[in-house]
Amino acid sequence: MKFDTLHQGISLYENYARVSGFDNRLYSTKKRKSDGKISLKHCVCNKEGFRETQRLQSNSKKKRPITRMGYNARITLKLINDQDNYIIFSFHENTHIP
């Protein structure tokens, strides 16, 4: 699937997440050194991964709930070099949603 802008690809994943019953978050970005344009963008389920153990053992008074549960839903959007369009480079469906 091809998108004219990065925002269109992210919007598609936001709609997929809403319909599938989870929220998403923007995970990481890689930019080209030559012009600073975003070449890769990762969007993941908000429950993807696990919290760092050092944060779990924090001595702070305010304890935060555990929200990262190892879910695997994600999409990677990649810039097509000869055009200014983005494609879905990889897609992982979330299989952990109750």
Image (spheres, helix red, strand yellow):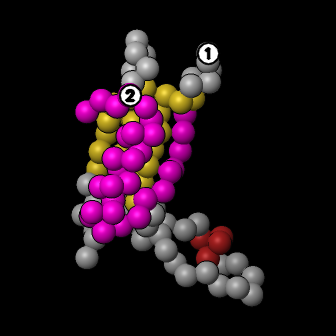
Labelled disc at residue 34:
1
Seen at 33% across and 55% down, the residue is 15
Question: Looking at the rendering, which quadrant does residue 85 occupy?
Answer: top left
Labelled disc at residue 4:
2
Which is nearer the eye, 77 or 69? 77
Marks 1/2: CA distance? 21 Å
Packing grade of label 1 (10 A; few <14, some 14-19, many >=20) is: few
Mark 2: amino acid: Asp
Could you tell whether 34 is left or right of 61 in the image?
A: left
Taking 12 as reference, is 69 above or below it?
below
Q: Was residue 2 drawn as part of the magenta stretch in this picture?
A: yes
Could you tell whether 73 is left or right of 24 in the image?
A: left
**SS for tag 1?**
loop
Packing grade of label 2 (10 A; few <14, some 14-19, many >=20) is: few
Q: Was residue 43 drawn as part of the magenta stretch in this picture?
A: no
Give the mark nearest the N terminus, 1 or 2.
2
Seen at 33% across and 47% down, the residue is 12
**What x and y, as percent, mark residue 24?**
43, 59
**What x and y, as percent, mark residue 55?**
65, 72
Seen at 45% across and 63% down, the residue is 46
**What x and y, as percent, mark residue 34?**
61, 15
Question: Looking at the rendering, which quadrant does residue 8 occupy?
Answer: top left
Give the quarter of the figure containing the C terminus.
bottom left
Residue stretch rendered in magenta on the structure? 1-30
